[in-house]
Image (tube, helix red, strand yellow):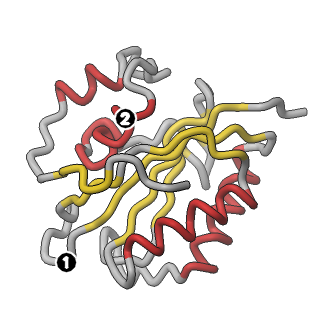
Amino acid sequence: MWSVNDLILHIGSNIGDREENLSTCLRLLNIHCGEIINTSGIYATEAWGIKDQPEFLNQAIHLKSYQSPEDILKNIQKIECIIGKEKEFHWGPRRIDIDIIFYGKEIIETDSLVIPHPMMQKRAFVLLPLMDIIPDFIHPLLDVSIRKLTEDCMDSSYAHKIIVDPVI
């Protein structure tokens, strides 16, 4: 049986009403995935990978959940469908994108799920929001803190906080 776990998610939106998409996502995460403990500020960020698309709004979320990682993934996919995930191509524009960054200190690698998120340490748009909520958390595979990963990150794309204390 699964026990309560700290779950760290990252959400992003770059089409439609981006702030409303994030807000709706938070409400649905609270209903379908677990209790929201903390959120980062909201960051305006350059698109990663394919730059020629609208700016993203990104946020990190800390939840407590009794659900298994597989159930969390299913519920996240359901939330993305409800909000209207319309990703036409890899790294393309989307109304909402939800990624599992950490599930406690678990290391999981299956056909459908890899935790910790394998690219998070290379992306400023993920690390900066994480700095707001878990700067001293030690990455279970890399054995370094979020703070150190942020300091060492080579991603030069811009990311700046536009909303310091969003309403949950």
- Residue 77: % across, % down: 63, 67
Query: Residue 155, percent across and down?
Result: 14, 43
Res 80 → quadrant:
bottom right
Q: Nearer the viewer, residue 40 or 155?
A: 40
Q: Badge 2 is on which residue?
A: 132
Residue at which label 1 appears: 53
Percent x, y for residue 4? 78, 31
- Asked if the residues shown at circle 1 and circle 2 are in contact, with their CB atoms under 8 angstroms apart, the answer is no
Disc 1 versus disc 2: nearer the observer: 2
Rounded to the nearest angstrom, the CA distance separating label 1 from label 2 is 26 Å
Amino acid on which the number 2 mark rests in the picture? Asp
Looking at the rendered structure, the number of numbered marks drawn on it comes to 2
Q: What is the crowding at mark 1: few (fewer than 14 residues within 10 Å), some, or many (at least 20)? A: some
Query: What's the residue at 23%, 44% (across, down)?
Result: 124
Horizontal side, residue 58 vs residue 33: left or right: left
**Measuring 45% from the left and 51% from the top, which residue is drawn there?**
10
Query: Residue furthest toward the top?
Result: 143
Q: Quadrant of the image for the N terminus?
A: top right
| 86 horizontally vs 24: left or right | left
128 over 55 or under it: above or below = above
Q: What numbered label is drawn on residue 86?
A: none
Label 2 secondary element: helix
| SS at mark 1 in the image | loop
Q: Is residue 28 visible?
A: yes
Is residue 8 in view?
no
At which x and y percent is residue 2? Answer: 84, 33
Q: Mark 1 is on which residue type? A: Gln
Say if 63 sits above or below 133 in the image.
below
Specify the farthest residue to the right.
Answer: 1
Give the residue displayed 35% in from the left and 57% down from the top.
58
**How many neighbours does mark 2 have within 10 angstroms: few (below 14), some (14-19), or many (20 or more)?**
some
Residue 147 lies in what quarter of the image? top left
